[in-house]
Image (spheres, grey):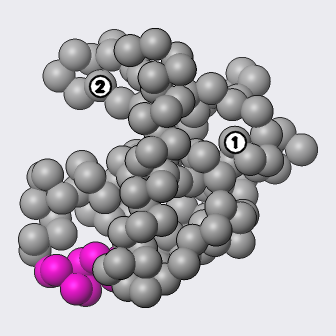
Amino acid sequence: MSPNELEELMSDSADNAVKTAQAEFNTPLDFTAQSIATVDDLLLAFIEKYQEKALEEKAVFTICNIFGAYVGETLRRYVKGTWIYDESNPQAPYMLLAVESNTYAFAGICYERLVNDKSVSVKSYFDQALANHQ
């Protein structure tokens, strides 16, 4: 996948997050730093609304990737960054946002909150990423 195709994919995925938040929860997302706190709430709202179905593999993959793309695309509005498709483990490739010498796994932090630990904060992770580059 070319860098342009990857950026288009992530932009489209972020737009899907915006549409999903609106359609499923009547919640707007506006690509501001403040909106990332809403992502924290939305991830848990999927479990509330769909219970175990929200934790099925395909649902988790979709939810984490579109909201991870949204968080990354929001950060890109504040700082320059480049999406990277990491295939170092062919069984589990993943997306990272590279900003200067740092990389951020936004889908991964969404996964942590959705699946493993409700106390993990996507907003805190985003805020630290933003602070690293201001």
Using residue 4 as the reference point, say whether residue 52 is left or right of it. Answer: left
- Residue 77, above or below 47: above
Q: Is residue 130 magenta?
A: no
Q: Position of residue 17 (x, y in %)?
A: 43, 61
Q: Quadrant of the C terminus?
A: top right
- Which residue reaches farthest right? 134
Task: Select label 2 or label 1 by which is in front.
Answer: 1
Residue at x 72%, y 21% (from the top left corner) = 101
Q: Position of residue 94 (x, y in %)?
A: 36, 30
Based on the displayed image, in which of its 4 quarters is residue 114 positioned? bottom left
Chief SS of the magenta region: helix
Tell me the SS state at disc 1: helix
Residue at x 40%, y 57% (from the top left corner) = 16
Mark 2–mark 1 Cα distance, whole angstroms, equals: 21 Å
> Any mark on residue 76, and which?
1
Residue 68 visible, this angle: no
Q: Amino acid at mark 1?
A: Arg
Residue 123 visible, this angle: yes
Q: Which residues are magenta?
A: 44-51
Of 50 and 24, nearer the camera is 24
> Any mark on residue 102, and which?
none
Q: Quadrant of the N terminus?
A: top left
Tell me the SS state at disc 2: loop
Q: Position of residue 122 (x, y in %)?
A: 54, 61
The residue singled out by tag 2 in the image is: 93
Based on the displayed image, in which of its 4 quarters is residue 49 positioned? bottom left
Q: Amino acid at mark 2?
A: Pro
Using residue 134 as the reference point, say whether residue 16 is left or right of it. Answer: left
